[in-house]
Amino acid sequence: MNYQYWNEKMETLPRPELEAYQLSQLKSTVDRALRTTFYKDTFIKAGIRSSDDIKSLADLQRIPFTTKHDLREGFPYGFLSIPLDDVVRLHASSGTTGIPTTIYFSAADLKRWAGFVARCIYGTGCTKSDVFQNMITYGLFTGGLGFHAGGEEIGMLVIPSGAGNTTRQFRLMQDFGTTVVHATPSFLLHVEAKMKEEGISRESLKLKKAFAGAEPYSEDTRRRIEALLHIDVYNSYGLSEMNGPGVAFECQHKDGLHLWEDGYIAEIVNPETLEPLPDGEVGELVITCLCREATTLLRYRTRDLSAFYTEPCPCGRTHRRLRRITGRTDDMLIINGVNLFPSQIEEVIMGIREVGNNYLIVVEKEGVMDRLTVKTEVGADIFMDDTRPLNALKEKIRKTLQASITINPRVELHENGSLPVSEGKAVRVQDKRPRDV
């Protein structure tokens, strides 16, 4: 396999040199953090008065964690580490509190961010000859403009099509010979179904690759998309608090996400005790951003669950790899005392050939007990008026799920294309249980 590197020197830097670079960047980050309202007090309490107190990467452990709650408490400018006059853009994500988490960028920050995304895209084998259709939401959400800038950095023809409107997406693909797309995995599954509905032949498209992110998805879902669309699908990881896309990405081996350690320091901790976990054990991902001057964030608790690979990648990159994000600590469902992640259900049902591309998980209260219902579409070749095979399929899904998650779910089968489809991040869970006041 021929590998291509956007920044070969940095991507293959020997570990001792990479860690020395991280330390120098960490010291600069600490100095910037001391200019912020939030970290100034936090650091003094931790006994850190300047970057001179950071002697090694191990001293990162002296710095307290930062949370989404902290970002909202510091809204709007508590984490700003440069003069407002030097800020050229902000991105924000909203939440249930109504207070957004807001991240600011300088011109230099945007240039660095574009470089990291370009590194991701180029590492999958893309070149400036590719036509890149960005089928993700633009605006305050970082995914749209982040990938857009990375594609332009490489020199690709970038089509900012945005999310939704599959009819227009197909027309753009056919008119301009799109070879690479970026979308949520749920939308890619929706695209395949709409192709059949609108009579779009696969031969009329030049698609080769897709970048899928913004929502957790299973390996079975990736394989399904690849088989349905006849493309290579690459897993992407990023979050708005760490710029957005470009934090970690799969290389051509598609076996773990290379986390760009010249821009980020990652830790895996036990989400309950917050103690560090050894490589290979699944825990909460904590990230320190080293590549942004406008908004300083150290030891940010992402709530995402992952683990480090212990062996090097054959591609030659020295940056450590993360396992696929399996879910979030705050996505976990507790059903009659059993801990369950939605990704566990997806992994099961997407591995059943007769199941369609869309599903919904509903949790309700029946008396004092929780009731789990899994609603899933059937494949396009399954007839809803033939009850015997439908009942057999329903029982197959129920038994397979029960064997995997130890919960006996109720299974509902729905006609292909009948469950609601989201043009942004898919809404896979409806928890209808009453909340304690």
Image (tube, rainbow, N blue to C red):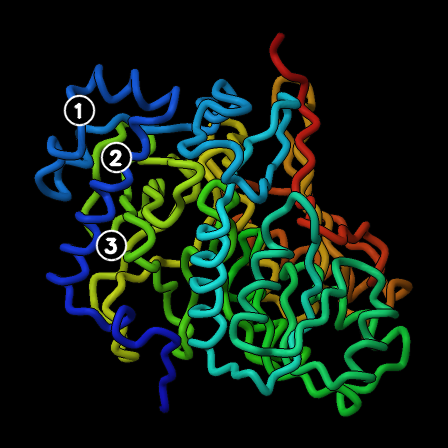
Q: Residue at x 29, y 56 (%)?
A: 261
Q: Position of residue 150 (x, y in %)?
A: 53, 66
Query: In this view of the protein, can residue 50 be seen by the observer?
Result: yes
Q: Nearer the viewer, residue 222 or 61?
A: 61
Identify the mark nearer the N-term, 3 or 2: 2
Determine whether 408 is above or below 209 in the image. Answer: above
Task: Check the picture and name the quadrant holding the C terminus.
Answer: top right
Q: Does the CB distance between marks 2 and 1 fall below 8 Å?
A: yes
Instruction: Tell me the tag on residue 48.
Output: 1
Q: Position of residue 410 (x, y in %)?
A: 68, 43
Q: Nearer the viewer, residue 64 or 426?
A: 64
Q: Position of residue 87 (x, y in %)?
A: 53, 40
Amino acid type of the residue tagged 2 in the rendering: Val
Q: Quadrant of residue 395?
A: bottom right
Residue 247 appears left or right of 62: right
Q: Disc 3 and disc 2: Cα gap in Å? A: 29 Å
Instruction: Tell me the tag on residue 30.
Output: 2
Neighbour tally class for label 2: few under 14, some 14-19, many 20 plus, Cα within 10 Å: many
Identify the mark nearer the N-term, 1 or 3: 1
